[in-house]
Image (cartoon, grey):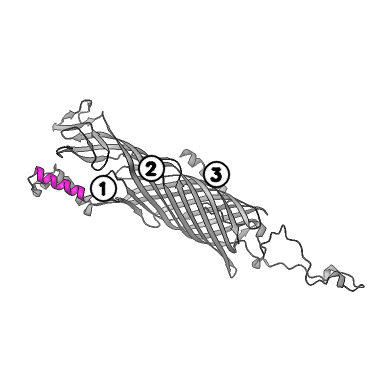
Amino acid sequence: MKKFLTMVPCALLLAVPASAATFYTGQTSHSPQFRYTPTGASPMTRTAQHNQWSPAPQQRHPGMQTHTMHQRPQQVMPPQQQASSAEGFSLSAGLSHQYAMWGFDMKTIGSKLHYDNITWNVFDAGIRYGFRTGDVMLRLDGGLRYGTQMGNSTMVDDDVTNGGTVYDFLYDPDTEEFLGYLVGQALSVGRSTGGSMLGYSVGITLADQFQFGRVRVNPGIGWRHLSYNLKTDRNKGMAMSIATEGSATTCFVVPGTQELQCIPVILVNTGGDNWAIITEEGQLVNGNVYIGNNYSYNQSGTSHDYKIEWAGPFVALELEYEVNPNNIMTGRLEIGLPGYSAIGNQPYRIDWATSNPIRDSAGIGSAFHIGLGANWMTAVSDNIMLTFGFSLDHYSVSGAEAKLSLNGAFWEARYWADINKNFDGSETAALNDPTSEASSIAGLFADCPNWICKDKNEIDSVYRSMGIRIGLAARF
């Protein structure tokens, strides 16, 4: 990340004379070879023509002297009528290699999840159409890109360093007897492969309207969409028990999975400040906090699956500088106010809904996007250019809503099992006992009506990417 941040000043410097950051089409301009020529022919190859109003030399009277002052000068289109390089259709395509990261923090829960060193291979294509209306040149822009994840990236699901906690119920795996509660912290690390990316953009630009010497400034507005999918497999984790109370130590296989979880220690409060530890290797510290064994777990399949989307309006400013008749440097600054959406699934969580239980969102205008970029464009023919580019993008949102859908069937089964087994089927007696599992589940349902838990202003999320690109642009 430190390397990433040190490149931001460089990108800002490049963006002053250069462009095409977040469009990824490399098509912000065309070669001066076909600028201001009605036919599109290069002024470097065009030859002077005899004026059609001058009589041919062999037809002149032998006694008549030729005076060039009587010839009509070659006609030149007035500047306001000159053909612009933005007029007509142009196409572009290219390949880019991008480095990215995405993550989110949960404010009150204290959990952090982030995918680091994501590498994308991205193909992009763009189309543009410029037309004149009165004295104004407008340009319609459209772009599409598709990317696939290359290699492995690292995912870290961290409930430790940000103060997050795990609160769970403990059961005897044979008798399903309620043993007590576990309060702890967990940290898991997995690998991400096989991710995908899809993006598109549409916009309109005021082209060739503001010119300062060799520099053109083209403002525009539009809509941009970026979505990507990241999955984690081979996840390994460790949970650290901080304080528990119950009566047994147990290892068990999570129902419906091959995941083995072991809880090596349970602290039992025997009254007042007296605690008993049921473990062979544990030790008691400060009377009531256990520090010693932890338990680990291995999730061999997909443990995390997230689909993220940023979409909304933007304003952009393109800068174009003609280096010489064959080369142009372009720059682009784009600022957007998109909305944010993240849909997640963690299949090993049997207490959560089985289909996409995690849904974080923020409306259009709640998030922020800034894109910077630079392009060097060089002519390979009158109508085709080779482009080399650099791009930098930053998306962020603060205070998005977190929504979690629980597995109602799981919790209801636990609720009635406790009532029937420990309170002879009396729901009233179970709810009047604040230490009962049924009472805890009833409190959970009160906080999460219809088994949907909502927390506003909970999610802070960031996506950053940096890429290099090579492509072609052609005008027709």
What SS does tag 2 mark? Answer: strand
Instruction: Please say whether residue 414 is one of the residues in the magenta stretch.
Output: yes
Residue, disc 2: 114
Is 63 left, or right, of 256 in this rendering? Answer: right
Three-letter residue code for mark 3: Cys
Q: What element carries label 1?
A: loop
- Left or right, 221 with respect to 271, comes to right
**Crowd rating for badge 1 (residues with CA inside 10 Å; few <14, some 14–19, many 20+):** many
322 and 327: which is toward the camera: 327
- Point out the tag, 2 or 3, that comes first from the N-terminus: 3
- 183 left or right of 65? left
Task: Indicate yes or no whether the magenta region holds residue 397.
Answer: no
The tag on residue 352 is: 1
Lower sequence index among marks 2 and 1: 2
Callout 3: few (<14), some (14-19), or many (20+) C-alpha neighbours within 10 Å? Answer: few
The boundaries of the magenta stretch are 409-424
Residue 313 drawn at (x, y percent):
45, 59
Prevailing SS of the magenta stretch: helix
Instruction: Say which residue label 3 marks.
Output: 10
The residue at the point 48 percent across, 41 percent down is 4
The percent coordinates of residue 1 (x first, y second) are 45, 40
Residue 17 visible at all:
no
Taking the view exactly as shown, the residue that stands out farthest to the bottom is 61
Circle 3: element type: helix
